[in-house]
Amino acid sequence: MTAKLRTARRIAAGALALAVLATLVILRTGGDEPGNTLWVTVPDATNVIAGQEIRAAGRRVGRIATAEPVRGGRAVRLQLQIEDAAWPVPAGSRIDLRWGGTISIINRYLALTRPAHGRPLPQGGSFPARDFHVPVELDQLVASFPAGVRGDLKQFLDEGGTTAAKGQEGLKRSLDRAPAAVDRVAGLMEDLDRDPAGLSALVRTTDSVVDAVHRADPGIQRLVTGAATTLDALGDESVDLERTLARMPGTLAAARGTLGRADATLRSAVSVTDRIAPGVTEVRRITRPLDRVLRTVADVGPDVRQTVSTLRTAAPDLTKLLDRGREVLPQVESIGKQAVDELRCIRPYTPDIIAFFTNWGGFLANSDGKDKYLRATVQNLLPAETNVDTRDSAQAKAQNPGLAYAFPQPPGLSADQPWFLPECGIGPEVMDPAKDPESRLRNPLSNIQNVPDMRSGR
């Protein structure tokens, strides 16, 4: 019975060892799905870190496996791990760094956009750096302005506000009434555009009327001349009436001929009237919107005059404002040129700045999102021989090997990936305590007499 129990214990211990080994393997591999690898080296990968998701059409298709600085910290080499469901990745694909939400700045992910066609990229091959894009960050827009420039900008806004305040009433009335005039003009243009055939017919019939009148002019002239002759004859002496009556047949014959020609003229006039009728209808329809437009213009006229008068009164203030702006613009240009160099030295610290606020946010919280807990920092201050430390940085480092020194601290040091910027005065020498720029050159107690020796008790 004892032998069987011992055998059962051995089997149980072996099974437990196998379970622990399997657990370690799973933890070692991270439990990730099998994937495919692409490499990309880019000069700028701000806010791109290992573990970030790669999504396509809103679905997770991979992650950033590793992110390692190369070329002395001036570039980063990223390992893209793509799942089998999204493999292969065709050439011409694009990767963009996106925010996790409208108010999420830190929770980023990479969006993979695939073209309709393209040759597949090889396993373990390179993803083109030109197709890897990161957005413009807020720190790239930050500029440092001296107090003088801020004062000039305030004066600019104050004077501009005064000028706008003087003309705000007239300008407001003009803007309130302007939509009516614009609507009337829009209605007129819509009416003209709604029936281009009618407008074209109006133009053509008007031309026909003018041409018909021109062609009928000689006949009308003869008719009027004959009528005038008849009336003159009737107005002459009565003795001439008989002579006139005697000549009446000839006159009537001439009138018959004239009426024949007039008949043709009238038929042309009827034809012209029929042709011009659609144009007259369109003119009548256009007249009403045009009348409303003219009335609106007449109503807006006083406000426009008042606005112009206000602008004329404010002209001296505008002149001063423009003159001051001309003086300030060279300073703004100089600030912009200097800000470019300053931003080149500030921009690499973006991850450190964001991490600073993230760490402090976690430090001040009393919950990790799952459980409540208490965080405390316990300190015990040991008595010291004196409140003056005469050691420099190199001596303190030598006496305390566990201390770490860096001044000024290069970007990325918190993640053990320092990025040296010699052009900004942050080279490898900032890690050497012997080159501390603030090291004391002498003992500050050397010139003090009768200093008690705390160690000897004297």
Image: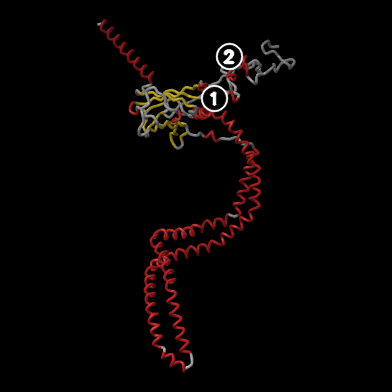
- Residue nearest the viewer, comparing 295 with 1: 295
- Residue nearest the viewer, comparing 199 with 238: 238
Amino acid residing under circle 2:
Asn
Query: In terms of secondary structure, where does tag 1 sit?
Result: loop
Are there few (<14), some (14-19), or many (20+) residues within 10 Å of tag 2?
Answer: few
Q: Quadrant of the C terminus?
A: top right
Q: Residue 400 carries which label?
A: 2
Q: Which of marks 2 and 1 is in front?
A: 1
Place of residue 108 in the rendered image (x, y in percent of width and height, measured from the top left): 44, 31
Q: In which quarter of the image is residue 394?
A: top right
Query: In terms of secondary structure, where does tag 2 sit?
Result: loop
The way the protein has been coloured in the rendering is secondary structure
Q: Which residue is drawn at 65% across and 45% down?
A: 324
Q: Is residue 44 left or right of residue 34?
A: right
Q: Residue at x 62, y 38 (%)?
A: 333
Q: In which quarter of the image is the N terminus?
A: top left
Q: Which of marks 2 and 1 is nearer the N terminus?
A: 2
Place of residue 9 in the rendered image (x, y in percent of width and height, measured from the top left): 29, 9
Per the model, the C-alpha gap separating discs 2 and 1 is: 24 Å
Q: Are marks 2 and 1 in contact (CB under 8 Å)?
A: no
Q: Quadrant of residue 109?
A: top left
Q: Residue at x 46, y 85 (%)?
A: 229
Amino acid residing under circle 1:
Pro
Q: Furthest residue to the bottom?
A: 239
